[in-house]
Amino acid sequence: MVLYNNCTEPSIYWYNDWMEFIDSHCHLHDEEFFSAEAAEGVLKRSIAAGVRRVMVIGTSLNDSKNAVRFAENHTKNVWATIGAHPQGDGIEDVSAELVNTVDGFAELKSPKIVAIGEIGLDYHCKGCERESQMRLFEEMMQVARDRKLPVVFHIREAYDDAWSIIDNFSGVRGVVHSFSDDETRLEQALKRDFYVGVNGLATFAPIPLPPIERMLLETDAPFLAPVPHRGKPNEPAYVPDIARFVARKLDVALDDVARITTENSVKLFSLD
């Protein structure tokens, strides 16, 4: 299901020529959502909007390989993560052969790989395979530790079990992607010195924001388009809309939001 073939142009953004944003989480490489031609147009629009670097996120072994390939073909603007989403293809690998799956991630090499993720736990669906999710999460956390890479966490309605696993891997750095819980969960993430991903969901749902010093901006494109783009496929060029929302909500200057969140992404992922 390709969502992008003949994309319409996003709104024109105003930004200073030195203002830079980073989309720390998107799925621009996934041809289920973006045709190859459309992905090129989306990437060009993101750069024109001041979103000059993007992170494409792996959700299974095969998807991670595609993310790395996409990043290697866009050496100046794109970096990749490798991971197994707790639902979908990622978790199906567990029931097949966990050892081979984990070995596949361990053997996947590229200078464009800057994190392990998205990995974690998701208990939102009824009857989800919690035991399999936890097994996969533990194994992938070990991969992150072995490779000394930060983690992109996907945690949904599963924080207690997630913390019990994460706390066994002291010193692991990371970001809680698409945070959508309450103040208590936010404080738990911040106490563990994690960054928190803020995306379009925050522009239309009552979600607490982390302090700007612990925030990364992301889109999760093509999902979760921010206001005023609700109903459209999301894309990295909409990061400035999220930044403007954050600036208003936290009463800080837009250029500070751009500068600090960009610095946070560069620091966490050791970007060039």
Image: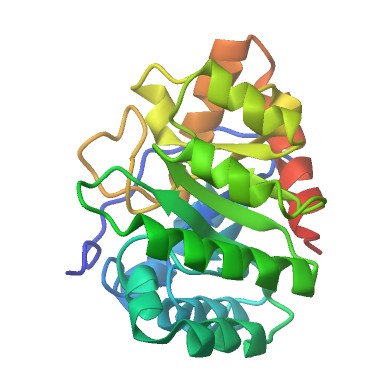
Check the image and report above or below for 141 versus 52.
below
Task: Say which residue appears at 69% left-offset and 84% top-offset.
Answer: 110
| Image colouring | rainbow
Answer left or right for 2 relative to 253: left
**Viewer can see residue 229:** yes
Task: Say which residue appears at 43% left-offset and 26% top-offset.
Answer: 202
Quadrant, the N terminus = bottom left
Name the spot of residue 152 as percent of width and height, x first: 59, 54
Task: Say which residue appears at 41% left-offset and 87% top-offset.
Answer: 97
Name the spot of residue 195 as percent of width and height, x first: 68, 39
The outermost residue toward the top is 251
Task: Say which residue appears at 27% left-offset and 49% top-offset.
Answer: 233
Name the spot of residue 12 as percent of width and height, x first: 43, 38
Give whichever of 201, 54 is nearer the camera: 201
Answer left or right for 120 relative to 72: left
The outermost residue toward the left is 1
The outermost residue toward the front is 131
**Viewer can see residue 76:** no
Check the image and report above or below for 209 versus 139.
above
Answer left or right for 192 relative to 91: right
